[in-house]
Structures are given as structure tokens and as C-alpha cells.
Image (tube, coloured by chain):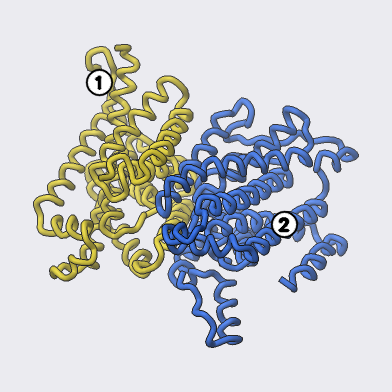
Chain colours: A blue, B yellow
């Protein structure tokens, strides 16, 4: 944590050096993917594996864009509304799941169904959302750009950085709180946790709220940055699994893990795209897939997890054994 | 009864037959190996490509392409088990699911690399049949009958063969069976091969109804998982019945609204079912 504030300040200065647009573009994409991954990992590391987080990206992005296009409400107000709505949906879905002890595979598949419902709804409401062709937020002349949150790449760099820092702050606050201990206990044994007075449903709902809000925030900013929304890239199983892959590859038990995962996934995509051009479509998911399998077999704690364990075992060889996850 | 509603109902039952096969395969694998193959629909997709390739590109007769599709996908199931699932047998369930999710990307990517993203059609169709007041698609009816036959063979295999008995026993009690002289790893392998073969059969039935493209698995994969969970994961009979319930909901829902909304209704029905019966409709 102590390196984080200098790191943030350093990153905030990057646009002042006027680097190439492409670099900024990659940075914004990585940061926003990292926010979504951080949100997912908040639940994932406590065994609440969601295969429907894409839905919250979609709910957030489309709510914001529709408020802008139909009611002229600036994204500065639209984003908080969209995030709140997505978190509300998350809690509404989570509450019955947690009350009725829908856990493990069942929870994963309920979230998968929810993600698909959102994707199909977005497609079906094509009169408003443009269906699978996607939609574009209405553009404004440059002098009103600040009000409409339509500005150059540097502006989005700062916004994305802010969102990313917010995600890490949420992670850090959660880690310091009793809630994190309670959630760890719940993920080990729910009944035992309840028997020592942990409010299982409430703890799970709280982390769901934070997690879905972060995912929705990432979704709104992605949409506003790209100025284009479509149901495949903002909802459904494909994007949901990509979020999961990023978080797992980087390591979902460490705060910077999902960020490292985002760098890997975006980096891999770009390297393959530049190396092979459009001839190699399909190469990226192919290699993702192999890596995901290898990660699950050999490095289930992700890259950051391995680094941390090495450091910890060097510093305190008699410390607690790492949790076998 | 309104003939159109009746037609939707019949189509729903026919659709249920097609959903039933992958649901049976998934439940078999889950019941025996205790792992959810998240890439199951992608195995079906590969099988569809196999049939399409053999039939339209190599000019094999259709029945031979169908016959070749089963062992191909069955082999894929064996590879999936040996290379991905087996090293993770003692890992937490979530790691297993995510690894098979990796295979989902891998297969989609591989097929995109080989065949591009074009929609491929077999170009085979059978004339619709008029039964009383309603029309029934010949292809759908044939697929339904094939699905029933496949399910029947599976049932006989599990019921009357030694291996089938061992499979049912290991699904019942994983700890005791090794003591009875059954090698669980061998049974897992057989179940994976049979699960793959069922995916292959499902591929034969789907390829005549749907165009093949690398992401076609996403169109019927999610509903297959929901059917399995609705019937109770690992409960083969439950999954079989749930497939018909889902088929009818999708088809009759499409009669009143658009196809998309019918899927929304089906998925919403699934979520409500899980809240009412968290271990599936037919949990004991």
C-alpha cells in the first residue's frame, strides 16, 4: 500500500509528458479492465464466483448512455445513477441467493443466467438500445465536452486512474475491516460462521454491493471512452469470463492482482493483433484459453500470488502456511 | 385449442428433446466426475463443424459424417478429462470450472482460426409434415426421435452393463467404490467419453437446425446449464424432464412474444426455480 500513492502520482503525470495516443489508449483500457477485475475479485476471492459480472458493466453503461441520449442527463450525474442501479440489481439478485443458500456451482450458474438475461434484454430492446448493432452516445461540440464528459484521451486517463484508485481503496478498506475476516470465515464454512454470530447474508450483500458497483463504474467509463456500446462487449458470458480470466491470471487474492491480469490480457490481445493483424482472429481467445487452463493447474493464485508467497516465505519462514486455494 | 398454440407446444416438446441430450451428458459427467464442463456447448460446436466439414467439404455421405462425429467428440471429451480435469481433481470446484472455461475460449479460438467466423450451413432440410391441423418440421421431428433413442441407449447402458452399474455406483458414493475394486479414474474416463459422445450426438441433431459458427455454443450453452441445475446437478432424470419444461417455455413464450423475450422468460423462470428449490426441481 505504501508504494501506491507515489505510483498514483507518477501515473497521473504521464499525460503531461504527451506520450503517443496509442499508449494512453492502452493505459485507459488496462485501467478500466482492472477496475472490473478488481470488482469481480472482491467477490471471487471469498468463493462467490460470479459468471455474470458482464451484466453489471452492461446495466451501468446502457443506463448512463440512455439517460444521456433520451433525457440529456450528463454522464457526471448519469454515472452515479447507473452505478447505483447496477448495485441495486446486484443486491436484489444476491439477497435471495444468499438467504436461500444458493452457493458454489449453483450460485455461479444463477449469475450466468442473470448475465444472459441482461444481454438478451439489451438486444431485445433494440428500439432504445440499437440491439446487437450497438449504440453511440450523442456527441456535443468540443466546447461543451467537459459538461458531457466527452474529452480527449488524457482526460479519460485521469478519470480511469481515479476509478482504479477507488477500486484499490475499496479493497484496502475491506481488507482492514472485520468484514474481510467474516467473509473469509463464511467462504470456509458458512454454517460454522453463522454459528459464531456472523451475519452471513449481510456480509455477502455488502461485498456484492461493492463488487457490482465497481463493475458498473468500469462499464460506464468504458462506454463513455469508446463512445460506443454493444451488448456482446458489455454483457453476456463472453465478457464475464474475460473479466474472470483477467482476475485469475493476475491473482485474485492480492489487491494488484486483477490489474496485473488486465495488463496481461490487454497486452496479449494487442501483441497478437499487431503481430498477426486480422489474419489471426481467434488467436487471442485460443491462447487465453490455454493460459487459463495452465494457470488453474499450475498457478491458481495467479502471478501476484506467487510473487507474494515467495516474498512472504523469504521474510517469515515460520509464518502461517498459505491458504491452499 | 388454438392450432398455433398447439403447434408451439409441440415444437416446445421437440425442442426439449434436443436440449435433453447435452443436459444428460453434462449431468452424467457432473454426477460421476463432480466437475461442471463449462465448455460443453463448445464440444457440441466442434462436433457440428466436424459434420459440416465431412459432409460439405469432403463430400462424405451424411450418415457417415454423423457416425464419425460421435467418436471425434468422444475423443475430445477424453482429452478434456485427461489434460484438464484430471490434474485438477482435488482442486476447489471453482478452479475446475474456470479451467473448463479456459477450454471454452480455446475451442472458440481454434475454430475461428481454422474456419473463420462465417456462418456455415449444411443445407439439408426435410419437408414439414401436416399432422391434423398443425405443421411439424421434419428435421425437428427426426432430431427429437434421435434424441429419444440416444437417451434410451444411455439408460440401457447405465442400467444393464457392468460399467454402467459402476458409473451409477460411483455417482452415489465416491469413497466406497474404490474399496469395492472399482478404479474411479477408469470410470471417470469412461463417463467423460460417454459425455463427449452425447455432445457429438447433440451436434448431429443441432447441425441440421442451426448454422455453425465459432460462437454458436453461446446460443444454447447457457440454457443447457440452466436445465441441468433446474433438474438438480447430477440428476439425470431431473435434467431430462427439465429440458422439456424449458423447451416448452421457450417455444410457447416465442408464440406470445419474440424469441428473445421467450429466452428472458425461460431464464427468469430458472432463477425463480432456484430460489424456490435451491437444489433443483426434482431434488430428493
Quarter containing the C terminus of chain B: top left
Q: Residue at x 21, y 57 (%)?
A: B172
Question: Mark 2 = which residue?
Answer: A166
- Residue A12: give x, y in percent of width and height: 82, 62
Q: Residues within 10 Å of mark 2 (few under 14, many from 20)?
A: some
Total count of labels: 2
Q: Is residue B195 visible?
A: yes
**Residue sitting nearer the eye, A21 or B125:** A21
Question: Which chain is mark 1 on?
Answer: B
- Residue B205: give x, y in percent of width and height: 29, 39
Question: Mark 1 = which residue?
Answer: B129
Q: Is A325 positioned to the left or the right of A81 in the image?
A: left
Q: Is disc 1 placed on a helix, strand or loop?
A: strand
Q: Residue furthest right?
A: A143
Residue B280: which quarter of the image? top left
Q: CA distance from mark 2 to mark 1?
A: 62 Å
Residue B135: which quarter of the image? top left
**Residue sitting nearer the eye, A269 or A161:** A161
- Residue A282: give x, y in percent of width and height: 52, 54
Q: Is disc 2 placed on a helix, strand or loop?
A: helix
**Residue sitting nearer the eye, B104 or A284:** B104
Quarter containing the N terminus of chain B: top left
Q: Residue at x 82, y 66 (%)?
A: A9
Examine the rendered structure and indicate whether residue B15 appears above or below residue B257. Answer: below
Examine the rendered structure and indicate whether residue A321 appears above or below residue B80. Answer: below
Amino acid at each position: 500500500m505504501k508504494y501506491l500513492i507515489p505510483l498514483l502520482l507518477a501515473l497521473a503525470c504521464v499525460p503531461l509528458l504527451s506520450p503517443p495516443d496509442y499508449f494512453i489508449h492502452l493505459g485507459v483500457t488496462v485501467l478500466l479492465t482492472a477496475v472490473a477485475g478488481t470488482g469481480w475479485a472482491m467477490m471471487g476471492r471469498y468463493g462467490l464466483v460470479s459468471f455474470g459480472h458482464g451484466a453489471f458493466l452492461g446495466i451501468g453503461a446502457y443506463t448512463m448512455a440512455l439517460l444521456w441520449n433520451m433525457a440529456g442527463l450528463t454522464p457526471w450525474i448519469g454515472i452515479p445513477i447507473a452505478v447505483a442501479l447496477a448495485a441495486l440489481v446486484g443486491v436484489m439478485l444476491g439477497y435471495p441467493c444468499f438467504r436461500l443458500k444458493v452457493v458454489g456451482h449453483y450460485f455461479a450458474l444463477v449469475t450466468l443466467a442473470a448475465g444472459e438475461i441482461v444481454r438478451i434484454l439489451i438486444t431485445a430492446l433494440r428500439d432504445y438500445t440499437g440491439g446487437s448493432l450497438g449504440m453511440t452516445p450523442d456527441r456535443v461540440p468540443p466546447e461543451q465536452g467537459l459538461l458531457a464528459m466527452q474529452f480527449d484521451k488524457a482526460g479519460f486517463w485521469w478519470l480511469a486512474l481515479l476509478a482504479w484508485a477507488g477500486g484499490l481503496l475499496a479493497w484496502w478498506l475491506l481488507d482492514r475491516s472485520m468484514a474481510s475476516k467474516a467473509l473469509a470465515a463464511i467462504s470456509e464454512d458458512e454454517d460454522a460462521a453463522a454459528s459464531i454470530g456472523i451475519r452471513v447474508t449481510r456480509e455477502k450483500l455488502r461485498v456484492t454491493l461493492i463488487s457490482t458497483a465497481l463493475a458498473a463504474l468500469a462499464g460506464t467509463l468504458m462506454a463513455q471512452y469508446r463512445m460506443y456500446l454493444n451488448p456482446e462487449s458489455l454483457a453476456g458470458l463472453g465478457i464475464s469470463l474475460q473479466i474472470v480470466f483477467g482476475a485469475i491470471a493476475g491473482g485474485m487474492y492480492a489487491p494488484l492482482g486483477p490489474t496485473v491480469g488486465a495488463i496481461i490480457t490487454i497486452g496479449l490481445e494487442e501483441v497478437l493483433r499487431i503481430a498477426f493483424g486480422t489474419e489471426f482472429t481467434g488467436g487471442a481467445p485460443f491462447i487465453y484459453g490455454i493460459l487459463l487452463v495452465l494457470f488453474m493447474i499450475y498457478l491458481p493464485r495467479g502471478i501476484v500470488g506467487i510473487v507474494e508467497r515467495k516474498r512472504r516465505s523469504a521474510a517469515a519462514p515460520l509464518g502461517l502456511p498459505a491458504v491452499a486455494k | 385449442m388454438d392450432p398455433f398454440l398447439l403447434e408451439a407446444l409441440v415444437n416446445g416438446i421437440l425442442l426439449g428433446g434436443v436440449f435433453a441430450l447435452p443436459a444428460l451428458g453434462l449431468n452424467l459427467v457432473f454426477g460421476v466426475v463432480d466437475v461442471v464442463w463449462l465448455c460443453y456447448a463448445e464440444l457440441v460446436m466442434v462436433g457440428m463443424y466436424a459434420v459440416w466439414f465431412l459432409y460439405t467439404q469432403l463430400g462424405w455421405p451424411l450418415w457417415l459424417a454423423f457416425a464419425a462425429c460421435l467418436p471425434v467428440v468422444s475423443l475430445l471429451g477424453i482429452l478434456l478429462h485427461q489434460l484438464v480435469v484430471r490434474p485438477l481433481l482435488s482442486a476447489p470446484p471453482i478452479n475446475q470450472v474456470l479451467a473448463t472455461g479456459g477450454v471454452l475460449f480455446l475451442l472458440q479460438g481454434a475454430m475461428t482460426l481454422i474456419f473463420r467466423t462465417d456462418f456455415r450451413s449444411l443445407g439439408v432440410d426435410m419437408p414439414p409434415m401436416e399432422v391434423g391441423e398443425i405443421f411439424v418440421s421434419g428435421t425437428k421431428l427426426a432430431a427429437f426421435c434421435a434424441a429419444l433413442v440416444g437417451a434410451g441407449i444411455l439408460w440401457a447402458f447405465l442400467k444393464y452393463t457392468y460399467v454402467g452399474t459402476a458409473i451409477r455406483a460411483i455417482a452415489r458414493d465416491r469413497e466406497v467404490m474404490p474399496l469395492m475394486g472399482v478404479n474411479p479414474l477408469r470410470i471417470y474416463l469412461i463417463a467423460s467419453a460417454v459425455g463427449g459422445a452425447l455432445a457429438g450426438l447433440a451436434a448431429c441433431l443441432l447441425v441440421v437446425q442451426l448454422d455453425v459458427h465459432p460462437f454458436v455454443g453461446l446460443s444454447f450453452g447457457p440454457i443447457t446449464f440452466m436445465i441441468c441445475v433446474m433438474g438438480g446437478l447430477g440428476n439425470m432424470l431431473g435434467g431430462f424432464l427439465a429440458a422439456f419444461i424449458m423447451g416448452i417455455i421457450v417455444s410457447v413464450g416465442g408464440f406470445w412474444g419474440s424469441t428473445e423475450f421467450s429466452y428472458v422468460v425461460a431464464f427468469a423462470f430458472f432463477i425463480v426455480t432456484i430460489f424456490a428449490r435451491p437444489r433443483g426441481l426434482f431434488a430428493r
